[in-house]
Image: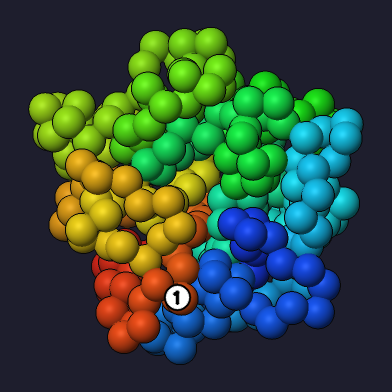
Amino acid sequence: MTASSEVVLVGVPLHCVGMPEPGDPPTGTERAPAALRAAGLADAVAAAADLGDLDVRLTGPDRDADTGVQGWPSVCAATEKLRARIAEIIGADRVPLVLGGDCTLLPGALAGAHDALGNVGLAYVDGHLDLYDGRTSTTGEPADMPLAVVTGHGPPAWCEVVGAPLVSPGRLALLGPRDREEAAGLGAAMPEDIGLRAEADPEDLRARGIPGAGAEARDQLSVGASGRYWVHLDVDVLDEAAFPATDYPVPDGLTLGELQSLLRPLTADPGLLAGLSVGCYNPDKDPDGSGAEELVALLGELLRYP
């Protein structure tokens, strides 16, 4: 195994759906990193190291008056800590596999990749567009906003923390969202508002041929000075019947087999893949652990490099 294909695990135990108070026991997606480890993830991906969990937690139910973000001080702290850790891992010529937690992690992860590599692309594989801000999000949950933040359209204070925009429209692929009508009704930014021609929902991906759509995204993202890109996977890109262990399940999504076919071209070359993050798996909704086993098998197929 060459240095550039060494996968390193780092957990980011964040949960913002009913954000906990300090001192509350771990809940929801906070428990995901531990559950994935217990299901054998390190062995499945032949991880070179497991750096454990960052000392981060989202806390506090109140929305910040300026940003509109719930638990804003804890969101800011988690973003900064993850940014530093990802820059360190990539700077050591390793591929970080970030175990969320929820999608609040993305701005910090992408900022760390940007610090280490310069301009990077982003494949955003998610059932939602996540282009809300502190005004249009009905809850203020930071996991509503990561794509808005990294493109420079989110709460200004959060954008400033990460130095957004972190990704240009030409190096951003939105794969699998299917909440356009709901998001538009609430006044969220649309992909065309941030310079994208379109997103690709599951129907679009199937029409194009899912492996080919993944390869097209890889070719689109692997341009520019670094030629590297980040892949973010929110498990609610999967159909709610195929994978119910997530906080906001959505119908008409991908099957596990389709997701693997989509991601395989994007993850096959560790020389292109800057890192991969996984968000929104909720062990509280997976009492028999089958969801964790499925995710571990998927990641093992994608990231176990020779």
Left or right of 27, for residue 197 = left
Q: Depth check: 294 or 185 in front?
A: 185
Q: Secondary structure at mark 1?
A: helix
Residue 230: x %, y % from top left = 51, 44
Q: Closest to the observer: 199 or 276?
A: 199
**Residue at x-position 64% and y-position 41%:** 139
66 relative position to 295: left or right: right
**In the rendered image, is residue 294 in sight?**
yes
Q: Horizontally, is 234 left or right of 215 in the view?
A: right
Which image quarter: residue 221? Answer: top left
Q: Residues within 10 Å of mark 1 (few under 14, many from 20)?
A: many
Q: Is residue 47 above or below residue 209?
A: below
User: Vertical placement of 156 versus 146: above or below?
Assistant: above
Image quadrant holding the N terminus, namely bottom left
Q: Where residue 247 sits: x, y (%)? A: 45, 58
Residue 261 shows in this picture: no
Q: Residue shown at 26%/54% (left/top)? A: 240
**Looking at the image, residue 39 lies above or below residue 85:** below
- Residue 105 spot, x, y in % from top left: 64, 53
**Amino acid type for the residue under numbered disc 1:** Pro
Q: Residue at x 59, y 57 (%)?
A: 17
Left or right: where 262 falls relative to 103:
left
User: What residue is rendered at 14% in x and 27% in y?
Assistant: 208
Residue at the disc numbered 1:
283
